[in-house]
Amino acid sequence: MMDLISQDKTHDESRQGEALLLDPVAGKNNGRKLYIESYGCAMNFSDSEIVASILSESGFETTGDFNNADVIFINTCSIRENAETRVRNRLKEFKVAKGKNPGMVVGVLGCMAERLKSKFLEEEKLVDVVVGPDAYRDLPNLIEQVDSGQKAVNVLLSREETYADISPVRLNTNGINAFVSIMRGCDNMCSFCVVPFTRGRERSRDPFSIVNECQDLFDKGYREVTLLGQNVDSYKWSQSAPPKPSPEGRALEEADQKVSPTGGDLEGAVNFANLLEMVAAVHPDLRVRFSTSHPKDITDEVLYTMAKHDNICKYIHLPVQSGNSRILELMNRTYDREWYINRVDAIRRIMPECAISTDVITGFCTETDEEHKETVSMMEYVQYDFAYMFMYSERPGTLAAKRYADDIPEEVKAARLTEIVALQQRMSLGRLQQQIGKVQKVLIEGFSKKSKNDYAGRTDQNAMMVFPVDERFKPGMYVNVIAEQCTTATLMGSIVD
């Protein structure tokens, strides 16, 4: 599979296989070292922060060298075939290290855990412990089981677990951007996807804990949060009498008196539009992003809320997957071509400046050339700012794998992918060229990867902007930058007073 370089943070290729390093927790060191690395989407990296918090409280210190570790965890992804291949190769490397240090504990976390537990534990004998996404609180007990000579497994899925009371340890962060998980699991049964089987049913986190976490991040100097969920638009939390805000959540003093754009109060049910308002109320200087939206659920109420608040970024990741209604039905996406176009038209009407990115799968089961052309025409209609594009790859355990033959030849898939990648590159360039000569508000995230003489940061529409360092401004500050030139993925400009 292949994807176009994109600024979207839902799946940052540069972070794949990233190992975390934390400062020790004073007075809690048990002498054991933890090595953990993560693969997959932003949700997986957010989960690793939860795992780090749980184990640091149990006295573990981290190491950047797995050969020096007492416990090794690899947080896995089942969405992409290449992610599974990389995980298996890493486990073989860890097995070699364990041969030199027999007391070492090797474990698999996350989405591959439940589906491949028997293979990892019994057939391939690569690991000692397998832990699913809802069982991280059990990690200290599971490690003790392994220490006593047993294999350990907990892949039970929960209808309640949201880890709302655990303050994640921020991993390898720039201290400016942070992910905040607002919900777990997924109730959508897209036929190509394993997430409902690996992450369980959808449940939303208490909004007050979310706002408290965002307030705490702002107080610590963070200036951007990305609200994470498999389908953020279906966020819904209800309680007859919401708890009183904690001292740290002073933003709620105002937020819990607000009403939604459609007139509903925040007593009782809280939907995603309400939550966006609550987080936006933390502080005008806290930027709010979110990922991922589902076309069947994104409402005008959410769009009007975004338009109303300057600090809610005008950027929506809206996966289309296919532009053909028959293929969308086979994918069980629960919307058709006309519905998707209606949602895009609503975005353009309510927020003309909003950037839209997407996911596209080419070569899904039985896809004809004419149906592929409808995907091309959809891309041309929307004019996406950027996109993730893949050839269909059958994933074991999915509904598509059980129901449909993967009958499109690989060379046909590849040719279709090449076509849409070339199209998207032209559109991405065109969309950025429209920004040249315009002044953008940019949050400085740090130095450019290519030069310490340049800063890099994102515009409101999530485009990366690179511009010369000005000593008056530091990372974490907002600056106005005029765009002067661009590539297909990056704007270049200079600060204007």
Image (cartoon, rainbow, N blue to C red):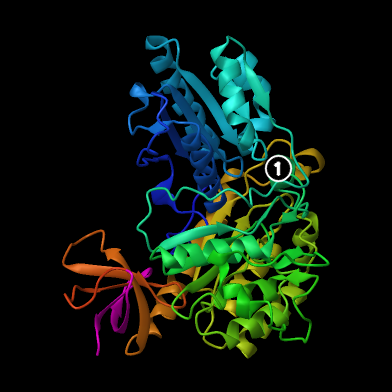
Q: Quadrant of the C terminus?
A: bottom left
Instruction: Find residue 275 and report its image quarter.
Output: bottom right
Instruction: Find residue 468 and report its image quarter.
Output: bottom left
Q: Is residue 92 above or below residue 276?
A: above
Q: Give 79 or 255, whichever is nearer the viewer.
A: 255
Q: Is residue 173 above or below residue 307?
A: above
Magenta part of the protein: which range? 476-497
Task: Residue 82 in the image: state x and y as whole percent.
Answer: 51, 39
Q: Is residue 14 above or below residue 475?
A: above
Number of residues whose C-alpha sits closer than 10 Å to that of mark 1, classed few (under 14), some (14–19) or many (20 or more): some
Task: Residue 187 in the image: state x and y as whole percent.
Answer: 78, 53
In this rendering, position of residue 401 left or right of residue 38: right
Taking the spot 59% from the left edge, 30% from the top edge, the residue there is: 139
- Magenta stretch: includes residue 248: no
Q: Amino acid at mark 1?
A: Asp
Classified by dominant secondary structure, the portion drawn in magenta counts as strand
Taking the spot 63% from the left edge, 39% from the top edge, the residue there is: 111
Task: Residue 62 in the image: state x and y as whole percent.
Answer: 38, 34
Instruction: Find residue 149 and report its image quarter.
Output: top right
Which residue, given by chain and number where applicable, does mark 1 sit on? Answer: 406
Q: Secondary structure at mark 1?
A: loop
Q: Is residue 125 above or below residue 444?
A: above
